[in-house]
Image: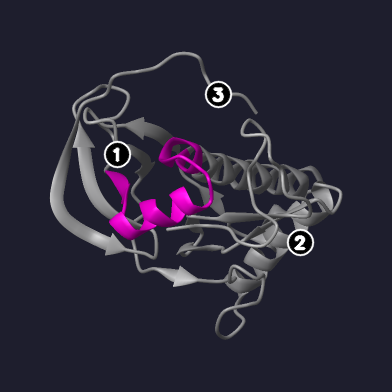
Amino acid sequence: MEWSPEFRCVEFVINPVVIGVGGFREAFSATSRRDDFNTSTWVVKKYLANALENIKATNQTPEQHTRKMVQMHLLAQNFAKQLQQEVCKRNNEEVYGEFMSYNNIYLGKMDDGEFVTVEEFVKGNFDKYINNDGTLCGTSTYIHMKAESLSQYSYVRSHEKLMVVDIQGSSHKLFDPEIASYELQEDDKQDIGCKHQLYGY
């Protein structure tokens, strides 16, 4: 996994009304007129003031933390795609049904230097299927079982080194995952998770 050396300047119109608040960030809807961004509604997520203090206490910069958020999302997206390919390779699509997936996400830097994530908006009602610690949320349904299969698949596929947790979203469209790692990685280029604590939206 490598960061693209190319930077793109994309203008967004951000609605000032907060559409969601989590423990670390608040979310705003946004649109763009740029050709490759004008087909979707986007969500810009900004850090809360107390979150920036917490990030600083872990000896990270907002940029480093935001990069990790994007890395975790993209890694979870990759695991979901691999699981789909595996099921299709075995001709079990009809048995498995609709696949879980993660939309696109980008690392963003505002004109004032603030680091944010820019993600495709997920429509529908929010639901959480698996907690940060890997336990199932609520009553088990077929969607919860699919979330469990994704989490288990990531664990097996990574040779028991990683696991997608904090699986949440609207039906089969997921967002804001976390990656639990067996070992804490100190290298900023490789660090995608933390052994004891993962920070999410």
**What residue is shown with label 2?**
152
Image point 45% across, 71% down: which residue?
127
**What residue is shown with label 1?**
40
Task: Give, as a single range, the part of the protein colored magenta.
Answer: 42-66
Say whether residue 46 is magenta.
Answer: yes
Label 1 vs 2, first from the N-terminus: 1
Mark 1 touching mark 2, by CB under 8 A? no
Q: Position of residue 101 (x, y in %)?
A: 55, 50
Circle 2: residue type = Gln
Q: Secondary structure at mark 2?
A: helix
Q: Position of residue 96 (x, y in %)?
A: 69, 61
Q: Residues within 10 Å of mark 2 (few under 14, many from 20)?
A: some
Quarter of image, res 27: bottom left
Q: Nearer the viewer, residue 5 or 19?
A: 5
Q: State how the image is colored.
A: one colour
For the C terminus, which image quadrant? bottom left
So how many labels did they put on this image?
3
Circle 3: residue type = Trp
Image point 44% across, 36% down: which residue?
63
Report, in whole angstroms, how far the alpha carbon at label 2 lies from the one at label 3: 27 Å
Image point 79% across, 42% down: which residue?
89
Q: Position of residue 42 (x, y in %)?
A: 29, 43
Report, in whole angstroms, how far the alpha carbon at label 1 lies from the one at label 2: 31 Å
| 14 with respect to 46 (left or right) | left
Mark 2 touching mark 3, by CB under 8 A? no
